[in-house]
Amino acid sequence: MIRSPQRTGRRRPRWRAALVAFALAASTTLSGAAVAVAADDYTQSATALNATQAQISFTPTTAAVYVDVHYVVSGQGQQNFRMDLSGGTWRKTVSGLATGNAIDYWFTYEKNGPQYDTPHFSYTHNGGSTTVATPTFSPGAGTYPSAQSVTITTATSGATIRYTTDGSTPTASSTLYGGPITVSSNATLKAIGLKSGSTTSAVATAAYVIGTPVATPTFSPAGGQYASAQTVTISTSTSGAQIRYTTDGSTPTASSTLYSGPISVPSTRTVNAIGVKSGLANSAVASATYTIGTSAGCPTQPDVPNFGPNTRIFDPGMSATSIQAQLDADFNAQKDTIAHQMGSGRIAHLFKPGAYSVHDDVGYYTSVAGLGQNPGDVVINGAITVDAFNESDKGVALQNFWRSAENMAVNPIGGSNRWAVAQAAPFRRMDIRGNLQLYPASYGFASGGYIADTKVSGQTASISQQQWYTRDSNLGSWAGGVWNMVFSGTPGAPPTTFPNPPETTLATTPVSRDVPYLYLDSAGKYRVFTPSLRTNASGASWANGSTPGTSIPMSQFYVVKAGDTASSINSALSAGCNLFFTPGVYHLNQTLNVTKANTVVLGIGYPTLIPDNGVNAMQVADVDGVRIKGILFDAGTTNSQALLTVGPSGSSASHASNPTTLQDVFFRIGGSIAGHATTSLVVNSHNTIIDHIWAWRADHGNAGTWGWTQATGDTGLIVNGNNVLATGLFVEHYQKTQVIWNGQGGKTIFFQNEMPYDVPNQASWNRPSGRNGYAAYKVADNVTSHEAWGLGSYNFFNVNPSVSAYNAFETPNNANVRFHSLCTVSLNYQGTITHVINDTGGVTPPGTVPVNVVSYP
């Protein structure tokens, strides 16, 4: 989003005021059907029920003692009523209306303290042409230990409901709702409301997960490399459960070999196991790979390595005062938007297993992580916080980039932990025992964000966040949303209601693999755990037991520190070592070549790789199972053709059972140095998982490092491989088409984009077809299968507001190329986007108001 006005020399952008009006509206005009307006701690709506009645609703984010509504119909005198409470929402039906009647209304409410009066809202009744109110489910979507009796209702009197239970979109010929539905197994219910003479409602969706699964089995010893045969025990914490397993790498079923005692593993093999018990869902698959009698060829490295001077390792035996002093010193060294955002400081805070009474304010290029094997092994009684710290932009979180939190439990001070971030700030494997606030304490703007493999027992509130993606997590509840909020595999997430509210939910994530992470074993040695591949995942990988996967000793990692060169790093890769990058900035005079299957490249503290003399920073062979996590690629001053390439051109091998994964991998063109790279990321290998990247061509930074000619980059991502999945794709400001998808069978779940701010004129920014501007996301004309959910593209052509783009999304017209929940926004009306996708969707209007397309084609 808009960055530092001091650093860029820009005036404070006026579109922020427009977004205030959008997110915390003082008033709004509604016509006919329901429209909801979000405020600090409530939502409200006015909805036509029929030709003569409308319903006013008020839903507080936390329980209210009472809610009164006051309204005036066409200036005829004020009416005051105590509203009726049902299912957390307060309602009042207004009768005796005629088409064209205007209602001015407002609320008074109390929450165990002072009374509050809301702003006034307006509604114009159009009883001759109403939209049926969207159906609601009771109980709502979620995970339940036993079968549920689900009722479906609509507030529109006389309407009928049609529904499906297989996740398909209901039509007027779907099953007619006649009474409560018994949901006894996992199911996704969808429903619509219909009424003669009225517009059919939006589709309501609720995903139900029934039955507590058996706890995921664990292996002892964990998978890894061993000099001799191992005797492996498998256990589950679910009393009375059986374990079924395989030793050939295949997926176990309830009829696989029954575990009855320790298993001998005399040679290299993969053991998979599930827990089974009557009346419970089967556990997730646990997997462990044992390499016996051989090594990867990596010369033995220390199991307790030196992680360099920028890594702080805290022990629960240290005094809280001394730990806090170090945390505060690091924060003060990294918090400032002007001094530190484009600086060279890199820091990691690592907490050994135990409990700590501290609060860690997280600044730029800082990673905070627990060293337990599970999040609950490290408990922070305090907070891990990001707020509107910016010195140059006080009150907003639009520049809170490049920081992370991982693998800890937090008992938050005051019941809530704040993580008000922008891009490149992942929140993974966290156990928040309370509420999570994703917005600044000032309620200022924020442009995030990403959560994965996390549990939040209370409410997660986004409020002023423009967009957000949450994957494979468990939420107590969710509140808020401005333009594009997306969830996959997340029990507790709201149902799909895009665009009002702008929420899109997938019951599961098709394929996912959680990040490799550093931990300390019971012998005090460091290891890296690599989680197993998951299919159709739902919930955190550790929600019902330890995360399944394989442990690798640090003896098989080459630890990269200051003084290492591209030559020394390549030598380690060639010998079969994995790489562990410590916090720092590393210049490369040759390409790093990852050629061996299952290589792990793991970074902490935002290690930054800068290619010199126009080399490509890293390339990966077309092999199985490479994992790259936690690396920032920063383009050098001589143009590179690509910063990271996965697989050579023409890669053809299938990696469906063991794909390469790119996670928390970030790309930057300019800002710190005047960088140049034609393409940031090229993916040629099939089945690659791109899980949370931010590819960013700078719109601000150090003097002389950003601008149309100072920092150049055509494209953020090119996908040539088939069956590639992107979960959490952030790509901004590139000078031509920003994402080009040439492979078949691709999927994207969540996309956030801004077009380049600094286009000098229309003539220099037209696509080869002659149409204005470049699309943000293009699916190639020869592609016959592709699907994407939750995509937003914004423009802010502040250098030349006469510039426009013909569309944001360009795709072939094919029934198997499908898009869901798209939006475009013109920020402060600095230029326009004419269409959303192909020729569908209107021009972006003034007022920082989104143009939405629910589905295409």
Image: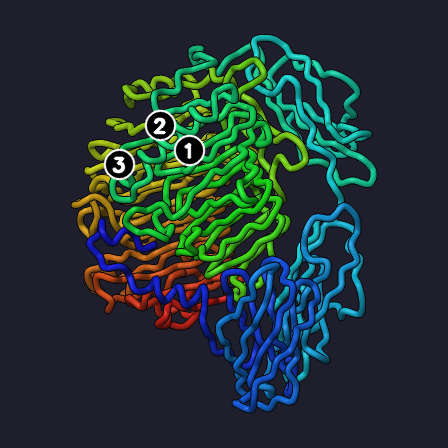
Q: Position of residue 460 (x, y in %)?
A: 55, 50
Which residue lies under the disc numbered 3? 343
Q: Amino acid at mark 2?
A: Pro
The image quarter containing residue 606 is: top left
Q: Residue at horizontal 46%, vertical 74%?
A: 27
Q: Give the mark nearer the N terminus: 3 vs 2.
A: 3
Q: Is 742 rendered above or below residue 802?
A: above
Check whether the beta carbons of the residues at disc 3 and disc 2 lie within 8 A of each other. Answer: no
Q: 395 or 807: nearer the eye?
A: 395
What is the C-alpha distance between the residues marked 1 and 2? 9 Å
> Can residue 244 be seen here?
yes
Q: Amino acid at mark 3?
A: Gly
Of all residues shown, which one is farthest toward the front?
Answer: 114
Which residue lies under the disc numbered 1? 367
Q: 344 or 352: nearer the eye?
A: 352
Q: 768 or 729: nearer the eye?
A: 729
Q: Position of residue 797 (x, y in %)?
A: 27, 62
Q: 340 or 857: nearer the eye?
A: 340
Q: Amino acid at mark 1?
A: Ser
Q: Is 97 rendered above or below residue 801?
A: below
Q: Which secondary structure, mark 2?
A: loop
| Crowd band around label 1 with a 10 angstrom C-alpha radius: few (<14), some (14–19), many (20+) | many
Which residue lies under the disc numbered 2? 583
